[in-house]
Amino acid sequence: MWQKKGLIFCTDNNYEWMISHASVPVAMNLHNGNIRIYFAPRNSKGQSIPSFIDVSGDNPAEVKYIHDKPLLVPGKRGAFDDSGIMPCSVIENDKRIYLYYVGWNQGVSVPYRNAIGLAVSTDGGDNFERLFEGPVVDRNRREPYFTASPFVYKDEHTWHMWYASSTGFVIVNERPEPLYVIKYAFSADGIEWIRDNITCINPKSEFEANARPSVIKEDGLFKMWFTFRGSFDYRDGKDSYRIGYAVSEDGKHWKRMDELAGINVSVEGWDSKMITYPCVLPYEGKKYLFYNGNGFGRSGIGYAIWQDEKAGK
């Protein structure tokens, strides 16, 4: 089970580009006693703009540093990320740090479309530059709607990516609401991705959407925490996001066991209506879970510590 420890950070009009939200925490061990948490605040236009905080590794509730400028700004007009940028996964590779992110485009017939981009840091993760102006994983002939929320895991020979792929839209109160499932891709270099249209997490119902995987490898198994919701009242309502769990031997075929996720909404407070966007970080013999609560991150970033190592074995 995850033992909740409470809020770490809540955005509150810190800067013009950091007005509200602290969405999709992405944690990285800095190897200096601190943990870096990349996240997406929203600016005065409601666009996601990535930045980070550093917290104590022994006590993540202790915020050591709040970055005072954006990591990246929206892309050029017409580019896949011209309406916002949301960090999703970081990988250390040959003294560089790869940041995989979601780029946002405003839509016409639907509210938005997404694609997955890549930025690289050569200074330990303080500054990033886009590797390309275009995405590295976008919609294609078998995935026609959008791609989003990647998590990348690198082993000795292979880069693995689990990501959300939209399967279409459902109209709810005259508004198109997106559906999506978690799919799998692999790569030799983290840039060119091979996608065999493999669905990892099957929805439990027709209108479930699942996304934002976070994967560790432990005891010979891939273990995934992810987020899922319904489609008809998910903005802090009865269909709002919850955290699920699955295991796999090969990273492609997964057994879903949400009852072992080990965490749910609280009775009251900042995560009482929604719990979402999990990020699991092994840290010096412990496992931390960083996540968002109500309002898709409007209420801030919190964390929990794993207390029972038997889940999924």
Image: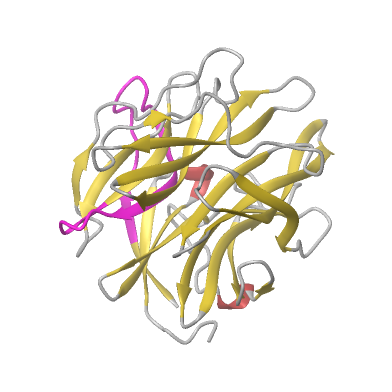
Location of residue 74 in the rendering, given as x and y in whole percent from the top left corner? 48, 21
Location of residue 36 in the rendering, given as x and y in whole percent from the top left corner? 28, 49
Q: Please identify the quarter of the rendering in which residue 228 is found.
A: bottom right
Which quarter shows the N terminus? Answer: bottom left
Q: Please identify the quarter of the rendering in which residue 98 is found.
A: top left
What residue is at 74 percent from the left and 59 percent from the top? Answer: 199
Q: Nearer the viewer, residue 132 or 285?
A: 132
Location of residue 76 in the rendering, given as x and y in whole percent from the top left corner? 52, 14
Location of residue 4 in the rendering, given as x and y in whole percent from the top left corner? 38, 67
Left or right: 297 as drawn, with respect to 111: left
> Is 279 situated above or below 40?
below
Q: How many marks?
A: 0
Q: Is residue 284 magenta?
A: no
Q: Is residue 23 magenta?
A: yes
What residue is at 61 percent from the left and 68 percent from the top? Answer: 251
Left or right: 310 as drawn, with respect to 242: left
Q: Nearer the viewer, residue 152 or 109?
A: 152
* Residue with the most extreme top position: 77
Residue interval drawn in magenta:
6-35
What residue is at 36 percent from the left and 50 percent from the top? Answer: 93
Left or right: 49 as drawn, with respect to 117: left
What residue is at 52 percent from the left and 23 percent from the top? Answer: 133
Q: Please identify the quarter of the rendering in which residue 16 is found.
A: top left
> Is 56 situated above or below 225?
above
> Is 185 situated above or below 129?
below
Q: Nearer the viewer, residue 197 or 231?
A: 197
